[in-house]
Image (cartoon, rainbow, N blue to C red):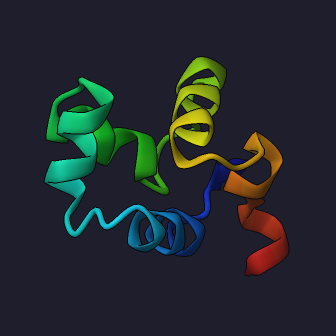
Amino acid sequence: MPIINKAKVLEQMAKKDILTFKELAEKLGISTTQLSNILSEKFEPIKSNVIELAEFLEISPIELIKDKLKDE
């Protein structure tokens, strides 16, 4: 099951001087709850959310995804 690579998100946030997930959610125009769900390991992210997040962070969607099974 693919999930969002939080380490990559944090790395890109730092490059954009975004300090908190709340700030990231505001810049994306979504609630912190929505962002939390996107980043949660319990939910498979929706493709459009991955693409939108990747575009905002200026990275490829592939860089943003990791396969949970491979990391266990």
In the rendered image, the vertical position of residue 26 relative to residue 8, given as above or below: above
For this orientation, the residue located farthest to the top is 48
Question: Which quadrant holds residue 69?
Answer: bottom right
Residue at image location 82% in from the left, 48% down from the top: 62
Left or right: 29 in relation to 22:
right
Residue at image location 32% in from the left, 31% down from the top: 28
In the rendered image, the vertical position of residue 37 relative to residue 64, given as above or below: above
The answer to whether residue 65 shows anywhere in this view is: no
Left or right: 72 in relation to 38:
right
Quarter of the picture holding the C terminus = bottom right
In the rendered image, the vertical position of residue 2 relative to residue 27, given as above or below: below
Question: Which quadrant holds residue 8?
Answer: bottom right
For this orientation, the residue located farthest to the front is 16
Which percent across, then down, holds residue 57?
54, 48
Residue at image location 71% in from the left, 64% down from the top: 68
Q: Nearer the viewer, residue 5 or 42?
A: 5
The answer to whether residue 66 shows anywhere in this view is: yes
Which percent across, then down, holds residue 63?
77, 56
Residue at image location 41% in from the left, 64% down from the top: 13
Question: Which quadrant holds residue 21?
Answer: bottom left
Which percent across, then down, holds residue 2?
72, 48
- Number of marks in picture: 0
For this orientation, the residue located farthest to the bottom is 72
Which percent across, then down, holds residue 3?
63, 52
